[in-house]
């Protein structure tokens, strides 16, 4: 679509079966989405924590914002965010449904980061695999339910921490085997 987009109070849904790219002015009073929903799960997951072997379902080629909800609850959705761009989503609901069908969020480059601000409600951040996201502009992204994967270089994201319980037991003397 090369025309002018005015969201009003509608829901814009990306539900294609191949990569969909968003570009242009996707922020401010004339470009922000009201509700944005992604249900396109095409593409291929990266083979590492960067973009090796990566084909996103949706490619944000520019900064974007919503004035209400940004929802991704379709398993195996893969989203690429433009490096250095700011994404302001008023409220989020992100759920990849299971460990084997996580949502993948990646930066468009193997350096730098995509910037994130979620000033409103975080309904869910579950089963997400994310790298190179800088959320220091706003409140921390709470990804601490134990289902998410911190792929590194994330700022102001709260992930579950591992707890180790130390015990003292006498196992005798250990010797090297010959």
Image: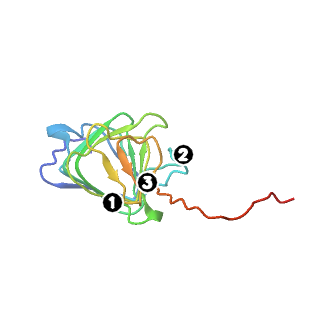
Residue at 24% over, 37% down: 25
Residue at 50% over, 44% down: 50
Say which element carries label 1: loop
Give the farthest residue toward the left.
8
Q: In the rendered image, which residue does mark 2 sit on?
A: 52
Q: Determine the CA span between mark 3 and mark 1.
A: 30 Å
Q: Earlier in the sequence, mark 1 or mark 2?
A: 1
Residue 71 relative to residue 98: left or right: left
Q: Residues within 10 Å of mark 1 (few under 14, many from 20)?
A: many
Residue 42 relative to residue 115: left or right: right
- Residue 129: x %, y % from top left: 43, 53
Of 10 and 143, nearer the camera is: 143
Labels 2 and 3 touching (C-beta < 8 A)? no
- Residue 100: x %, y % from top left: 47, 64
Looking at the image, how many numbered discs can be counted on the residues?
A: 3
Q: In the rendered image, which residue does mark 1 sit on?
A: 39
Residue at 47% over, 44% down: 152
Q: Determine the CA span between mark 2 and mark 3.
A: 27 Å
Q: Quadrant of residue 131?
A: top left
Q: In the rendered image, which residue does mark 3 sit on?
A: 161
Residue 113 relative to residue 30: left or right: right
Q: Earlier in the sequence, mark 3 or mark 1?
A: 1
- Residue 24: x %, y % from top left: 27, 37
Q: Determine the CA span between mark 1 and mark 2.
A: 23 Å
Q: Earlier in the sequence, mark 2 or mark 3?
A: 2
Say which element carries label 2: loop
Residue 101 numbered mark, or none: none
Residue at 79% over, 58% down: 175
Q: Quadrant of the N terminus?
A: top left
Q: Nearer the viewer, mark 2 or mark 3?
A: 3
Q: Nearer the viewer, mark 3 or mark 1?
A: 3
């Amino acid at each position: 679509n090369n025309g002018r987009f005015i969201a009003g109070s509608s829901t814009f849904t990306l539900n294609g079966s191949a990569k969909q790219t968003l570009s242009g002015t996707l922020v401010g009073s004339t470009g922000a989405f009201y509700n944005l929903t992604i249900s396109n799960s095409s593409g291929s997951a990266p083979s590492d924590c960067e973009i090796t072997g990566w084909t996103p379902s949706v490619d944000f080629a520019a900064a974007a914002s919503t004035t209400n909800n940004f929802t991704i609850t379709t398993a195996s959705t893969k989203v690429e965010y433009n490096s250095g761009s700011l994404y302001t989503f008023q409220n989020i609901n992100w759920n990849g449904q299971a460990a084997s069908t996580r949502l993948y969020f990646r930066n468009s480059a193997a350096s730098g980061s995509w910037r994130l601000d979620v000033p409103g409600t975080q309904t869910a951040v579950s089963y997400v695999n994310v790298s190179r996201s800088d959320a220091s502009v706003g409140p921390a992204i709470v990804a601490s339910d134990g289902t998410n994967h911190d792929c590194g270089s994330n700022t102001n994201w709260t992930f579950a921490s591992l707890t180790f319980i130390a015990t003292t037991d006498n196992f005798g003397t250990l010797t090297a085997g010959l």
